[in-house]
Amino acid sequence: MKTREMKRRITSIIVALLLAFAAFASFPGTVLAEGLSSNILFTDPAYTVSDEELDSLNAKLQEISERQQCEVVIYTTRDYYGETPQEYADGYFEQYDYGYGSDKSCILLVINSVEGNYAFTTSGFGITAFTDAGLDYIVNQMKPALKEDDYASALNTYANLCDQFLTQAHTGKPYDHGNLPGQENKIDKLMIDIPVGFGAGLLIAFLVAGKDKSALKTVHRQKEAAQYLRPGSLQLNYKGEQFLYQNVGTVEKNSSGNGSSTHTSSSGNGYGGKTGSF
Protein backbone atom coordinates (compact mmCIF):
# COMPACT_ATOMS: atom_id res chain seq x y z
CA MET A 1 0.00 0.00 0.00
CA LYS A 2 2.92 2.31 0.83
CA THR A 3 4.47 1.59 -2.57
CA ARG A 4 1.19 2.45 -4.30
CA GLU A 5 0.79 5.65 -2.29
CA MET A 6 4.38 6.64 -3.15
CA LYS A 7 3.69 6.09 -6.85
CA ARG A 8 0.61 8.27 -6.65
CA ARG A 9 2.63 11.00 -4.95
CA ILE A 10 5.26 10.80 -7.67
CA THR A 11 2.49 11.11 -10.26
CA SER A 12 1.17 14.20 -8.47
CA ILE A 13 4.65 15.74 -8.46
CA ILE A 14 4.98 15.08 -12.20
CA VAL A 15 1.61 16.74 -12.84
CA ALA A 16 2.70 19.76 -10.77
CA LEU A 17 5.96 20.03 -12.73
CA LEU A 18 4.10 19.82 -16.04
CA LEU A 19 1.69 22.54 -14.94
CA ALA A 20 4.62 24.71 -13.88
CA PHE A 21 6.21 24.18 -17.29
CA ALA A 22 2.93 25.10 -19.00
CA ALA A 23 2.74 28.28 -16.93
CA PHE A 24 6.33 29.16 -17.85
CA ALA A 25 5.62 28.47 -21.51
CA SER A 26 2.84 31.04 -21.46
CA PHE A 27 5.31 33.89 -20.89
CA PRO A 28 6.27 36.04 -23.92
CA GLY A 29 9.05 34.55 -25.99
CA THR A 30 8.17 30.97 -25.09
CA VAL A 31 6.02 28.90 -27.49
CA LEU A 32 4.38 25.49 -26.96
CA ALA A 33 3.60 23.33 -29.98
CA GLU A 34 -0.13 23.40 -30.67
CA GLY A 35 -1.62 20.02 -29.81
CA LEU A 36 -2.09 18.03 -26.61
CA SER A 37 -2.17 19.81 -23.28
CA SER A 38 0.65 19.08 -20.85
CA ASN A 39 -1.68 17.18 -18.50
CA ILE A 40 -1.98 13.52 -17.64
CA LEU A 41 -5.23 12.32 -19.23
CA PHE A 42 -6.36 9.86 -16.54
CA THR A 43 -6.14 10.87 -12.90
CA ASP A 44 -7.58 8.47 -10.32
CA PRO A 45 -7.82 9.97 -6.82
CA ALA A 46 -10.71 7.58 -6.06
CA TYR A 47 -8.37 4.58 -6.55
CA THR A 48 -10.72 2.76 -8.90
CA VAL A 49 -7.98 0.89 -10.82
CA SER A 50 -4.57 -0.62 -10.14
CA ASP A 51 -1.32 1.21 -10.92
CA GLU A 52 -0.73 -1.00 -13.96
CA GLU A 53 -4.24 -0.32 -15.29
CA LEU A 54 -3.76 3.40 -14.65
CA ASP A 55 -0.55 3.47 -16.70
CA SER A 56 -2.11 1.37 -19.48
CA LEU A 57 -5.18 3.60 -19.75
CA ASN A 58 -3.06 6.75 -19.75
CA ALA A 59 -0.99 5.41 -22.64
CA LYS A 60 -4.16 4.49 -24.56
CA LEU A 61 -5.76 7.90 -24.00
CA GLN A 62 -2.57 9.69 -25.09
CA GLU A 63 -2.42 7.68 -28.32
CA ILE A 64 -6.11 8.20 -29.14
CA SER A 65 -5.99 11.90 -28.30
CA GLU A 66 -2.94 12.59 -30.45
CA ARG A 67 -4.22 10.57 -33.41
CA GLN A 68 -7.76 11.96 -33.28
CA GLN A 69 -6.63 15.50 -32.34
CA CYS A 70 -9.15 15.60 -29.50
CA GLU A 71 -8.22 14.95 -25.88
CA VAL A 72 -10.00 12.05 -24.20
CA VAL A 73 -9.82 12.59 -20.43
CA ILE A 74 -10.93 10.67 -17.31
CA TYR A 75 -11.03 11.86 -13.71
CA THR A 76 -12.41 9.96 -10.72
CA THR A 77 -13.50 11.49 -7.44
CA ARG A 78 -15.33 10.67 -4.21
CA ASP A 79 -16.73 14.14 -3.54
CA TYR A 80 -17.96 17.12 -5.60
CA TYR A 81 -17.27 19.47 -2.67
CA GLY A 82 -20.60 21.25 -2.78
CA GLU A 83 -20.77 21.65 -6.57
CA THR A 84 -23.11 19.93 -8.99
CA PRO A 85 -21.53 17.17 -11.10
CA GLN A 86 -21.59 19.41 -14.19
CA GLU A 87 -20.04 22.36 -12.34
CA TYR A 88 -17.34 20.09 -10.99
CA ALA A 89 -16.51 18.67 -14.43
CA ASP A 90 -16.45 22.12 -16.08
CA GLY A 91 -14.25 23.47 -13.29
CA TYR A 92 -11.80 20.58 -13.55
CA PHE A 93 -11.58 21.05 -17.32
CA GLU A 94 -10.81 24.74 -16.92
CA GLN A 95 -8.48 24.40 -13.94
CA TYR A 96 -6.12 22.07 -15.79
CA ASP A 97 -6.59 23.71 -19.19
CA TYR A 98 -7.49 20.58 -21.13
CA GLY A 99 -8.24 20.55 -24.85
CA TYR A 100 -6.43 19.83 -28.11
CA GLY A 101 -5.45 22.69 -30.41
CA SER A 102 -6.86 26.18 -30.68
CA ASP A 103 -10.51 25.10 -30.29
CA LYS A 104 -9.72 23.07 -27.13
CA SER A 105 -11.24 19.87 -28.53
CA CYS A 106 -11.92 17.49 -25.67
CA ILE A 107 -14.23 15.02 -23.98
CA LEU A 108 -13.87 14.77 -20.21
CA LEU A 109 -15.55 12.09 -18.10
CA VAL A 110 -15.75 12.64 -14.34
CA ILE A 111 -16.94 9.65 -12.29
CA ASN A 112 -17.93 9.79 -8.62
CA SER A 113 -17.34 6.27 -7.33
CA VAL A 114 -19.14 6.92 -4.03
CA GLU A 115 -22.35 8.50 -5.34
CA GLY A 116 -22.43 6.34 -8.47
CA ASN A 117 -22.89 9.16 -10.95
CA TYR A 118 -20.97 10.92 -13.70
CA ALA A 119 -20.61 14.12 -15.70
CA PHE A 120 -19.32 14.80 -19.20
CA THR A 121 -17.82 18.06 -20.41
CA THR A 122 -17.15 18.39 -24.14
CA SER A 123 -15.41 21.22 -25.94
CA GLY A 124 -14.50 22.18 -29.50
CA PHE A 125 -14.79 19.24 -31.90
CA GLY A 126 -15.80 17.14 -28.91
CA ILE A 127 -19.21 18.86 -28.93
CA THR A 128 -19.71 17.78 -32.54
CA ALA A 129 -18.43 14.23 -32.10
CA PHE A 130 -20.31 13.40 -28.89
CA THR A 131 -24.01 14.19 -29.19
CA ASP A 132 -26.43 13.72 -26.30
CA ALA A 133 -27.59 10.41 -27.78
CA GLY A 134 -23.97 9.36 -28.27
CA LEU A 135 -23.05 10.11 -24.65
CA ASP A 136 -26.05 8.07 -23.47
CA TYR A 137 -24.93 5.19 -25.68
CA ILE A 138 -21.38 5.29 -24.29
CA VAL A 139 -22.60 5.25 -20.68
CA ASN A 140 -25.02 2.40 -21.39
CA GLN A 141 -22.13 0.32 -22.73
CA MET A 142 -20.12 1.06 -19.58
CA LYS A 143 -22.90 0.44 -17.03
CA PRO A 144 -22.66 -3.38 -16.72
CA ALA A 145 -18.99 -3.12 -15.72
CA LEU A 146 -19.54 -0.06 -13.51
CA LYS A 147 -22.28 -1.86 -11.57
CA GLU A 148 -19.78 -4.65 -10.88
CA ASP A 149 -17.14 -2.09 -9.78
CA ASP A 150 -14.99 -3.21 -12.72
CA TYR A 151 -13.75 0.28 -13.50
CA ALA A 152 -10.81 -0.86 -15.62
CA SER A 153 -13.13 -2.63 -18.07
CA ALA A 154 -15.63 0.26 -18.07
CA LEU A 155 -12.98 2.90 -18.71
CA ASN A 156 -11.36 0.86 -21.48
CA THR A 157 -14.81 0.62 -23.08
CA TYR A 158 -15.09 4.41 -22.77
CA ALA A 159 -11.69 4.94 -24.42
CA ASN A 160 -12.44 2.55 -27.29
CA LEU A 161 -15.87 4.09 -27.96
CA CYS A 162 -14.45 7.62 -27.88
CA ASP A 163 -11.97 6.53 -30.55
CA GLN A 164 -14.81 5.05 -32.63
CA PHE A 165 -17.03 8.12 -32.21
CA LEU A 166 -14.24 10.52 -33.19
CA THR A 167 -13.44 8.46 -36.30
CA GLN A 168 -17.12 8.59 -37.29
CA ALA A 169 -17.37 12.33 -36.61
CA HIS A 170 -14.42 13.02 -38.92
CA THR A 171 -16.53 11.63 -41.80
CA GLY A 172 -18.97 14.51 -41.28
CA LYS A 173 -21.76 12.28 -39.92
CA PRO A 174 -21.35 11.96 -36.14
CA TYR A 175 -23.16 9.21 -34.31
CA ASP A 176 -26.61 10.43 -33.23
CA HIS A 177 -30.24 9.24 -33.05
CA GLY A 178 -30.85 6.69 -35.80
CA ASN A 179 -27.22 5.94 -36.67
CA LEU A 180 -25.62 4.85 -33.40
CA PRO A 181 -23.23 1.88 -33.50
CA GLY A 182 -25.13 -1.31 -34.26
CA GLN A 183 -28.08 0.51 -35.82
CA GLU A 184 -26.56 0.60 -39.31
CA ASN A 185 -27.45 -3.07 -39.95
CA LYS A 186 -31.00 -2.47 -38.73
CA ILE A 187 -31.40 0.36 -41.23
CA ASP A 188 -30.03 -1.80 -44.06
CA LYS A 189 -32.46 -4.58 -43.11
CA LEU A 190 -35.37 -2.13 -43.12
CA MET A 191 -34.40 -0.98 -46.61
CA ILE A 192 -35.01 -4.57 -47.74
CA ASP A 193 -37.96 -5.46 -45.53
CA ILE A 194 -40.06 -2.38 -46.37
CA PRO A 195 -40.20 -2.91 -50.18
CA VAL A 196 -40.79 -6.66 -49.72
CA GLY A 197 -43.60 -6.06 -47.23
CA PHE A 198 -45.15 -3.38 -49.41
CA GLY A 199 -45.10 -5.65 -52.45
CA ALA A 200 -46.64 -8.57 -50.53
CA GLY A 201 -49.37 -6.31 -49.13
CA LEU A 202 -50.12 -4.91 -52.57
CA LEU A 203 -50.46 -8.41 -54.02
CA ILE A 204 -52.85 -9.52 -51.26
CA ALA A 205 -54.94 -6.36 -51.67
CA PHE A 206 -55.12 -6.94 -55.43
CA LEU A 207 -56.32 -10.53 -54.98
CA VAL A 208 -58.94 -9.55 -52.38
CA ALA A 209 -60.19 -6.65 -54.50
CA GLY A 210 -60.40 -8.90 -57.55
CA LYS A 211 -62.48 -11.44 -55.65
CA ASP A 212 -64.89 -8.76 -54.40
CA LYS A 213 -65.17 -7.28 -57.88
CA SER A 214 -66.17 -10.60 -59.39
CA ALA A 215 -69.02 -10.85 -56.86
CA LEU A 216 -70.52 -7.52 -58.00
CA LYS A 217 -71.31 -8.34 -61.60
CA THR A 218 -74.73 -6.65 -61.38
CA VAL A 219 -73.28 -3.31 -60.25
CA HIS A 220 -72.35 -0.78 -62.97
CA ARG A 221 -70.39 2.44 -62.70
CA GLN A 222 -72.44 5.67 -62.95
CA LYS A 223 -71.11 8.86 -64.54
CA GLU A 224 -72.63 11.24 -61.95
CA ALA A 225 -72.90 11.02 -58.16
CA ALA A 226 -76.56 12.13 -58.27
CA GLN A 227 -77.46 8.85 -59.96
CA TYR A 228 -76.55 7.01 -56.76
CA LEU A 229 -79.19 8.93 -54.77
CA ARG A 230 -82.80 7.86 -54.43
CA PRO A 231 -84.97 10.70 -55.80
CA GLY A 232 -86.21 13.05 -53.03
CA SER A 233 -84.11 11.37 -50.30
CA LEU A 234 -81.72 14.34 -49.78
CA GLN A 235 -82.73 17.98 -49.27
CA LEU A 236 -80.24 20.75 -48.34
CA ASN A 237 -81.76 23.88 -46.75
CA TYR A 238 -78.45 25.64 -46.04
CA LYS A 239 -74.89 25.34 -47.29
CA GLY A 240 -71.86 27.17 -45.82
CA GLU A 241 -68.38 26.88 -44.28
CA GLN A 242 -67.33 27.55 -40.68
CA PHE A 243 -63.75 27.72 -39.29
CA LEU A 244 -63.44 25.58 -36.15
CA TYR A 245 -59.86 25.65 -34.80
CA GLN A 246 -56.16 25.25 -35.63
CA ASN A 247 -53.24 23.38 -34.07
CA VAL A 248 -49.76 24.91 -33.87
CA GLY A 249 -46.84 22.68 -32.93
CA THR A 250 -43.39 23.78 -31.71
CA VAL A 251 -40.08 21.86 -31.72
CA GLU A 252 -37.18 22.83 -29.48
CA LYS A 253 -33.94 23.38 -31.39
CA ASN A 254 -30.62 22.38 -29.88
CA SER A 255 -28.32 25.33 -29.51
CA SER A 256 -25.40 23.49 -31.13
CA GLY A 257 -27.49 22.39 -34.11
CA ASN A 258 -26.18 18.82 -34.25
CA GLY A 259 -27.85 16.86 -31.45
CA SER A 260 -25.56 18.15 -28.70
CA SER A 261 -27.09 20.39 -26.05
CA THR A 262 -24.76 23.07 -24.68
CA HIS A 263 -24.45 25.01 -21.46
CA THR A 264 -22.41 27.89 -20.06
CA SER A 265 -19.97 27.31 -17.20
CA SER A 266 -19.67 29.61 -14.20
CA SER A 267 -16.73 31.28 -15.91
CA GLY A 268 -18.84 32.06 -18.98
CA ASN A 269 -17.44 29.42 -21.36
CA GLY A 270 -19.71 27.27 -23.54
CA TYR A 271 -19.47 23.49 -23.34
CA GLY A 272 -21.40 20.39 -24.28
CA GLY A 273 -21.98 17.42 -22.01
CA LYS A 274 -24.49 15.87 -19.64
CA THR A 275 -24.81 14.13 -16.30
CA GLY A 276 -26.43 10.95 -15.00
CA SER A 277 -26.05 7.97 -12.71
CA PHE A 278 -25.12 4.31 -13.08
Image (cartoon, rainbow, N blue to C red):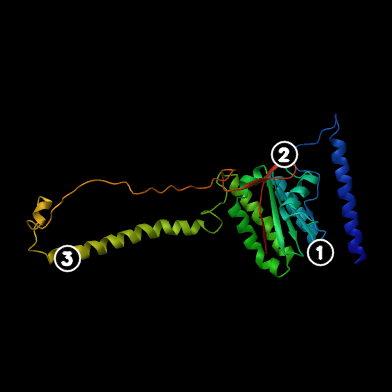
- Residue 19: % across, % down: 86, 44
Q: Is residue 37 left or right of residue 194?
A: right
Q: Nearer the viewer, mark 2 or mark 3?
A: 3
Residue 101 circle label = 2
Distance between the alpha carbons at the discs numbered 1 and 2: 31 Å
Tell me which label, 3 or 1, sits earlier in the chain: 1
Tell me which label, 2 or 3, sits earlier in the chain: 2
Look at mark 1 in the image and give the residue it sits on: 50
Distance between the alpha carbons at the discs numbered 3 and 1: 75 Å
Q: The disc labelled 2 sits on which kind of residue?
A: Gly
Mark 1 nearby-residue class (10 Å; few <14, some 14–19, many ≥20): few
Q: Is residue 247 left or right of residue 201?
A: right
Q: Is residue 92 left or right of residue 257?
A: right
Residue 212 circle label = 3
Distance between the alpha carbons at the discs numbered 2 and 3: 71 Å
Residue 275 occupies quadrant: bottom right
Q: Nearer the viewer, mark 3 or mark 1?
A: 3
Image quadrant in which the C terminus is located: bottom right
Mark 2 nearby-residue class (10 Å; few <14, some 14–19, many ≥20): some
* Mark 1, secondary structure of its residue: loop
- Most foreground residue, 241 or 10: 241
* Mark 3, secondary structure of its residue: helix
Direction top: furthest residue: 29
Mark 3 nearby-residue class (10 Å; few <14, some 14–19, many ≥20): few
Q: How many marks?
A: 3
- Residue 256: % across, % down: 59, 43
**Identity of the residue drawn at 43% across and 47% down:** 248
Q: Is residue 19 left or right of residue 76?
A: right
